Structures are given as C-alpha cells and as structure tokens.
Amino acid sequence: GAVVSQHPSWVICKSGTSVKIECRSLDFQATTMFWYRQFPKQSLMLMATSNEGSKATYEQGVEKDKFLINHASLTLSTLTVTSAHPEDSSFYICSASNGEWSEQFFGPGTRLTVL
Amino acid sequence: GQNIDQPTEMTATEGAIVQINCTYQTSGFNGLFWYQQHAGEAPTFLSYNVLDGLEEKGRFSSFLSRSKGYSYLLLKELQMKDSASYLCAAMDSNYQLIWGAGTKLIIKP
C-alpha cells in the first residue's frame, strides 16, 4: 500500500512558539492531503483539505491564520501551528489520496504537547 | 445534517466473532470505509464498500446496505491484537469523509 510519513512524531514546545509538521507521500503523488486533529478518546476531526498548488479549504471553526497549511508539491504538505497554546495540544494526523474518491492513506501522526 | 452512529464500546472473547454496526446519514454517498486505530497510533485502512453486499478479507468482512444507510464490520477468530478502536466513515457527495466517533473493542482472554 501507499506510504505516508509525518515528521516529527512528537514535539513538546513552549506556549507562544510555532511548530511545523511535515506530511510526505513517499511512493505516490498526493493530489489531495487532509489534516486531522484528534483529542483523547474522540474521533478524528477534519481541520482542512489541501490540493497541490492551491489554498487549503478549512473546516468551520478552524482558524486559518493559526493553522497554516502549505501544499507546495504533490508529495509534501506542511501544517504550522502558530503561537501554540496548551489547548492546541493534540494528536495531529495527515492523510493523502491520489484521487477524489480513493482511499486516504494516513501518516503515523504527530503528538503535540504545548507547555 | 450528516451523522454517523456506532457503539461506543464492545467487549468480546478471544477466538469469538464480533459485529460492529454503523449507521450513516450523509449528503450523497460515495462509499463506506472502516479503519482500525490502536491507541496512540494513526488509523489503518480495513475496508471500503460502495455497492450493497458483503466484502470478505481474511478474518475481517464488511457489509453495506445503501437503502438502509447501514454497514457492519465482522471480525472472526478474534485475537488479542484486535483490541483497538474501529472507525466507520462515510464519504459524501463532496468526497469528504464523515467520521464516526469509533467503537472501542475490548478482547478478553
């Protein structure tokens, strides 16, 4: 199956700093990448959908100026959490697909802890 | 509105069979996915149904009834490693995945 990597796997940062998370599709071209957030014992919450070369589409309630998404190539998307606060601590997961209706392949996730 | 319902938690015995049900209401429908998620890990794909009927894949099978907005995941010959959350997700007409809250499956020896 297709492989998606995420880096870093976990990160601890101080409140007010910015954190960048990378999502890479290793063996296929991802026309669409998705960013999810998952709080403990809750389901995945879609934050945004990004298509290569265009602006991301954010879900209602997700601040686009706080969660910056860049999908500059068909194999890389980045999520930057700006001015992180403790309430941003969560498990961030990306997924990628190579077609509108095809299966989403998930990265291993990034656990963010903001002190 | 769009909605996915699945039980919060189920318990089963090692070696037995368990069926996890999922009902969905979406704006349009482009298929039903089941994912497995172990604690602290990202989801992994199990199955995809877009036509009515049963899809069998080893110990796991998935069923879909589009007229009833209903799917189930059937796990046979349960093993301890099957203890995980099982997420049901329906794809709507915009190709967005609508996720259920997940069913935590506890396997007892």
Image: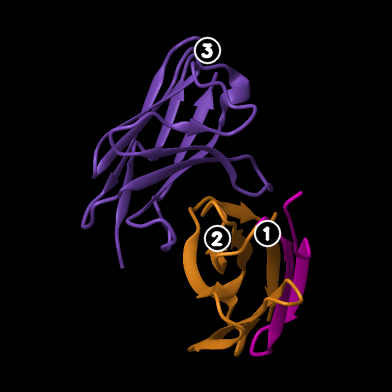
Chain colours: A purple, B orange
| Residue A114, position as x, y percentages in the image | 53, 22
Residue at image point 69% right, 69% down: B105
Q: Is residue A73 left or right of residue B74?
A: left
Gap between marks 2 and 1 measured at Cα: 9 Å
Q: Are marks 3 and 2 in contact (CB under 8 Å)?
A: no
Q: Are marks 2 and 1 in contact (CB under 8 Å)?
A: yes
- Of labels 2 and 1, earlier in sequence is 2
Task: Give neighbour class at mark 1: few <14, some 14-19, many 20+ (Cα, 10 Å).
Answer: many
The subunit letter for the residue under badge 2 reads B
Q: Quadrant of residue A79?
A: top left
**Which portion, as a residue range, is magenta?**
B1-27
- Tag nearer the camera, 1 or 3: 1
Nearer to the camera, B10 or A12: B10
Q: Is residue A107 left or right of residue B106?
A: left
Task: Give neighbour class at mark 2: few <14, some 14-19, many 20+ (Cα, 10 Å).
Answer: some
Residue bearing the label numbered 3: A15
| Residue A45, position as x, y percentages in the image | 60, 42
The subunit letter for the residue under badge 3 reads A
Q: Looking at numbered disc 1 in the image, what kind of residue is underneath it?
A: Gly
Residue at image point 42% right, 30% down: A11
B88 inside magenta stretch:
no
Residue at image point 37% right, 46% down: A32
Residue bearing the label numbered 2: B37
Judged from the image, the secondary structure of the residue bearing numbered disc 2 is: strand
Nearer to the camera, B54 or B18: B54
Q: Is residue A49 left or right of residue B76?
A: left
Residue bearing the label numbered 1: B102
B26 inside magenta stretch:
yes
Judged from the image, the secondary structure of the residue bearing numbered disc 3 is: loop
